[in-house]
């Protein structure tokens, strides 16, 4: 894992995460839309601006520069991977149940036919 933090990507991720539009984000910082967008392209940023951005997005971006953030991110990725695996397993179970349902419906039709023939 690299030690480099692309702070602009972290800011963009948080903005999208909380559902704030780019226009609102720029307005909260008193910037034009273009300047707000440019922030998300930066790999570094001065601390005063980062603090203002953090207030606007209700997030402490200084955590991005700590090992705790990396550990949390790794934990999140592990949980995400586990969740994706669980979803795949459940989808397979659902597919199997659908096949079983179809088979039971076909058997039911055959049994109905047999019952009608005996009547």
Image (tube, rainbow, N blue to C red):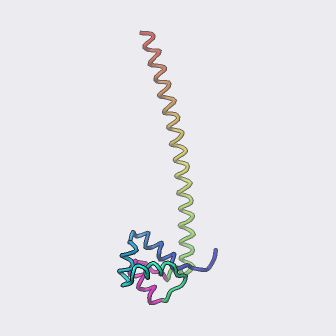
- Image-based side of 111 in relation to 30, left or right: right
Give the residue displayed 44% in from the left and 19% down from the top. Answer: 112
Looking at the image, which residue sits at the far top?
119
When the figure is inspected, residue 97 is found, relative to residue 116, above or below; the finding is below
Q: Image quarter for residue 67? A: bottom right
Give the residue displayed 38% in from the left and 72% down from the top. Answer: 21
Quadrant of the frame with the C terminus? top left
Q: Image quarter for residue 44? A: bottom right
Q: Where does the magenta region start and end?
A: 47-61
Instruction: Tally the numbered discs.
Output: 0
Residue 28, image x, y percentages = 35, 81
Looking at the image, which residue sits at the far right?
1
Residue 110, image x, y percentages = 49, 20
When the figure is inspected, residue 107 is found, relative to residue 56, above or below; the finding is above
Q: Main structural element of the magenta stretch: helix, strand or loop?
A: helix
Residue 14, image x, y percentages = 45, 73
Closer to the camera in the image, 112 or 71: 112
Give the residue displayed 43% in from the left and 82% down from the top. Answer: 35
- Image-based side of 52 in relation to 99, left or right: left
Q: Magenta stretch: residue 45 in it? A: no
Quadrant of the frame with the N terminus? bottom right
Give the residue displayed 57% in from the left and 64% down from the top. Answer: 78
Q: Magenta stretch: residue 52 in it? A: yes
Residue 85, image x, y percentages = 56, 54
């Amino acid at each position: 894992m690299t030690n480099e933090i692309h702070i602009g990507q972290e800011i963009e991720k948080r903005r999208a995460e909380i559902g704030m539009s780019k226009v609102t984000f720029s307005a909260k910082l008193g910037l034009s839309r273009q300047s707000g967008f440019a922030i998300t392209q930066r790999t570094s940023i001065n601390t005063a601006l980062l603090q203002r951005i953090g207030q606007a997005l209700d997030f402490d971006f200084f955590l991005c520069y700590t090992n705790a953030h990396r550990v949390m991110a790794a934990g999140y990725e592990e949980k995400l991977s586990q969740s994706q695996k669980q979803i795949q397993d459940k989808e397979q179970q659902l597919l199997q149940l659908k096949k079983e349902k179809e088979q039971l419906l076909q058997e039911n039709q055959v049994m109905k036919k047999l019952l009608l023939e005996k009547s």
